[in-house]
Amino acid sequence: MKAAIQRLAAMGLAGLARAITGVRPIWQGCAPSGRQRIYFANHSSHGDFILLSSSLPPSERSRTRAVAGADYWRRNKVRHVLARDILNTVLVERNWVERSEDPMVIMLGALEQGSSLIFFPEGTRNMTEEPLLRFRSGLYNLAVARPDVELVPCWIENMSRVLPKGALLPVPLLCRVIFGAPVVLEEGEDRHVFLDRAREALLDLSPERQKALAHG
């Protein structure tokens, strides 16, 4: 019953996201695949993972779960039920001082169950003027633990204007999700080198970089 509710909710949210944003997936560096993946993306809105999920083919969407901050989604009962029972998110505690569960154990558990993940390596929403915050270590740790899972960069365009911080209702605007080429952890690669390379791969998909590349 719960799985059926989650499938219906996913279909409904995907339809709503497409109706509001006209979201267009751009498979620039890869194609939809049956492979298990971690889609890592920029993060500026609570609607990011819904938009990215709605850009996936239905078969891939049904097995892809978003990693989200437990501190936000457990703040009240309604949010918690929505995240756990409807959106089927993977809730992780971001405060390392107060947390009772290791986020890596939770994420690896979801991967062991066969899920793909939507992951935000900045660790929090970017409310600055910078295109991307510094990447935290999570993406590297996942790459080390599960080298068989593809790491696909995804640039989410315009969602921060559709659902800005504090907004209750979305603003209809056109959005795109650009999927880049998978990033592979090289043997013996330093953590900082890998995270910088993954960050650059994601930045290369941003509208500013795309325009710069187009004009040489």
Image (cartoon, rainbow, N blue to C red):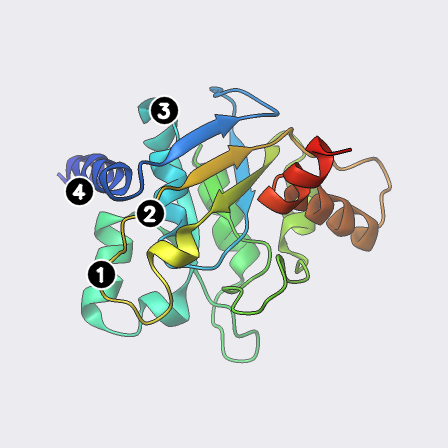
Marked residue nearer the N-terminal end (4 or 3): 4
Q: Determine the CA span between mark 3 and mark 1.
A: 26 Å
At a point 44% along the width and 38% down the height, the residue shown is: 176
Q: Can you tell which mark lies on residue 169?
A: 1
Sequence-wise first label, 2 or 3: 3
Q: Name the image quarter holding residue 215.
A: top right
Q: CA distance from mark 1 to mark 2?
A: 12 Å
Sooner in the amino-acid sequence: mark 2 or mark 4: 4
Q: Nearer the viewer, mark 2 or mark 3?
A: 2
Label 1 secondary element: loop
Q: How far is disc 4 from disc 3 in space, using C-alphas?
A: 21 Å
What's under tag 1, amino acid-wise? Leu
In this rendering, the answer to whether 59 lies above or below 77 is above
Pointers 4 and 3 in contact (CB under 8 A)? Answer: no
Q: Which mark is residue 173?
A: 2
Amino acid type assigned to the residue bearing label 2 in the image: Leu
Task: Give whichever of 195, 44 is nearer the camera.
Answer: 44
Q: Tell me: residue 84, above or below residue 93.
A: above
- The residue indicated by pointer 3 is 57
Q: Residues within 10 Å of mark 4 (few under 14, many from 20)?
A: few
Q: Which residue is mark 4?
A: 2
| Residue sitting farthest toward the front | 215
Disc 3 crowd rating (10 Å Cα; few below 14, some 14-19, many 20+) is few
**What x and y, as percent, mark residue 139?**
64, 49
Label 3 vs label 1, nearer the camera:
1
- Which numbered disc covers residue 93? none
Q: Residue at x 48, y 21 (%)?
A: 32
